[in-house]
Amino acid sequence: MRIMAALRLARGFVVGAGVSGVIVSTTGSSAQMVSAAETTHSVRRALERLPYYGVFDYMSFGIDRGTVTLTGYTYNGSLRSAAEIAAKRSSGVDEVANRLEVLPASQEDNRIRWVTFYKIYTDAFLSRYASGGEAGVRREIYEARRFPGMYQPLGFYSIHIVVRHGQTTLYGVVDSAGDRHIAEVRAREVFGVFSVENEIVVAKKAAKR
């Protein structure tokens, strides 16, 4: 059975991470004893517990016959190998295909990341999606100045910012289409960004009784 899932938020926090794309059922050696739902839950939990998964990373995964395929982008190169190890240790997993891309080192990309982070998470409507709110964002920026190029915000961030060669892609989950739009507007305000792709998902509200 193939299942696609995405880690929509950072560390510990996959609220809204969905499962989709169920196609043909089959089994691998571990999958014979563990259901697809159990494997998906186990892999998701393992990845979201990674200590260095931050706001400038984005990971998703697919499961097919006991094989987990990791895709997405990592700001810190060590996260790529850590994610593979975590997935391999998950219930029902036989193999891991690691297709995570380590983002290239670039001072300009790093500048765009931090300015985008500031603009999004200090916005009056979007600051609630930040770990610690606006005050927490300002602390993160202070720490980044102490360790330039070596630091990224961890914690609970609903909107992930991936920058590659001057192109920004936003991922994550927000409460409304309005918040999704505001995040894109703030990202487009950053000087020097070539393009902005908005892959943010609006969370589905529970039906009212």
Image: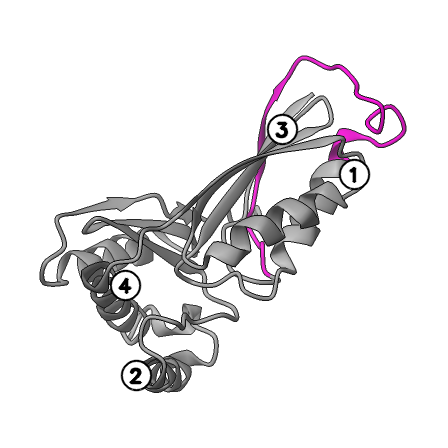
The part of the chain drawn in magenta is: 13-38
Q: How much space separates mark 1 and mark 3, taking CA atoms?
A: 11 Å
Q: CA distance from mark 4 to mark 3?
A: 31 Å
Q: What's the magenta bit mostly, secondary-structure-wise?
A: loop
Local packing at callout 1 (Cα closer than 10 Å; few below 14, some 14-19, many 20+) is some
Q: Which residue is mark 2?
A: 145
Q: Position of residue 97 (x, y in %)?
A: 59, 32
Q: Which mark is residue 14?
A: none
Location of residue 31 (image quadrant): top right
Q: Mark 3: few, some, or many residues within 10 Å (few <14, many ≥20)?
A: many
Residue under the point 63% across and 45% down: 84
Which residue type carries mark 1?
A: Glu
- Which labelled disc corresponds to residue 38? 1
Tell which tag, 1 or 2, sits nearer the viewer: 2
The reply to whether the C-beta atoms of the residues labelled 1 and 4 are less than 8 Å apart is: no
Q: State which tag comes first along the sequence, 1 or 2.
A: 1
Q: Which residue is mark 3?
A: 3
Residue at x-position 30% and y-position 57%: 105
Q: Earlier in the sequence, mark 1 or mark 4?
A: 1
In the picture, the quarter occupied by the N terminus is top right
- Closer to the camera, 124 or 20? 20
